[in-house]
Amino acid sequence: MEAPQQWYFVDGDGKQAGPVTRDNLQGKITSGVVVDETLVWSEGMAEWQAASSVDGLMNVPTPQAEPAAVAQVGSGSSLASSASSAVNPYTAPQSDLGVGAGVQAKPGFMATLFSFGGRIPRRTYWAYSFILMGIVMAVLVAPIMLLGEESPVTLIIVAVVYVGMIWSSLALQCKRWHDRGKSGWWFLIGLVPLIGGIWSFIEVGCLRGTMGPNDYGDDPT
């Protein structure tokens, strides 16, 4: 049995590759490894030649692409649902309500009182200010009535409540300044005699926050 004809070719790096059979070489033509300008040689050829100049070498049938598989649509898939809606004129219209998009989640009670981050509207500021006053009065009245004003326990409770009240008051003010589009450090303007208190009262307690999102969060209104 006669051995198959051996072929050599120059690869993309300019190096000699082979030997390969003619069928293997044509397989490389099909895959694009060997192109028209690729130099090839086989026994009996006087010199290296371009693959396109060798009779019948480049006549490789183009493989037929397999047809794309048709996706199976399950009865519960979104595609099936959309298709069903498209063909059924009595299907209720579907809409994306965008739940939560651009809407700031309302902070909880403790976060509103003690957190310095985010924004709150005027109504929340005033509501929690009155709630804070009520809590402070309720907490202070009991030990004063039961233990007396001069009791060490009463003094400790008063000190703790006072610190918590200052903290919560500043937290509420900072979130209102944020709602106005300003840094929470603006609460320091309240330390300016007369003018500072009036300015802070108007900005924090009376004016609406910036419309839409700002650097401190979404519009809470």
Image (cartoon, rainbow, N blue to C red):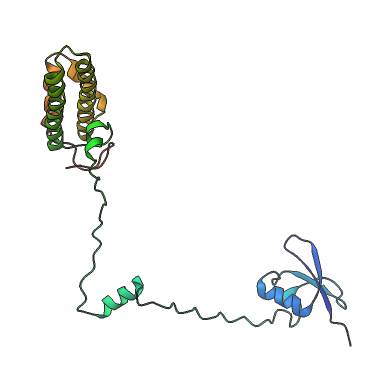
Specify the farthest residue to the front. Answer: 146
Residue 9, percent from left and from top: 78, 69
Residue 110, percent from left and from top: 24, 36
Quadrant for the C terminus in the image? top left
Q: Is residue 21 left or right of residue 190?
A: right
Camera-nearest residue between 163 and 107: 163
Residue 8, percent from left and from top: 81, 71
* Occupied quadrant, residue 125: top left
Q: Residue at x 26, y 76 (%)?
A: 85
Quadrant for the N terminus in the image? bottom right
Camera-nearest residue between 130 and 87: 130
* Occupied quadrant, residue 41: bottom right
Evaluate whether residue 129 shows in this view. Answer: yes
> Up-down: is 175 above or below 98?
above
Q: Residue at x 21, y 35 (%)?
A: 179
* Numbered-mark total: 0
Specify the farthest residue to the top. Answer: 150
Evaluate whether residue 53 shows in this view. Answer: no
* Occupied quadrant, residue 128: top left
Q: Is residue 100 left or right of residue 127?
A: right
Specify the farthest residue to the bottom. Answer: 1
Q: Residue at x 19, y 17 (%)?
A: 154
Q: Residue at x 26, y 38 (%)?
A: 214
> Up-down: is 13 above or below 214?
below
Residue 160, percent from left and from top: 24, 21
Camera-nearest residue between 94 and 124: 124
> Up-down: is 144 above or below 209?
above
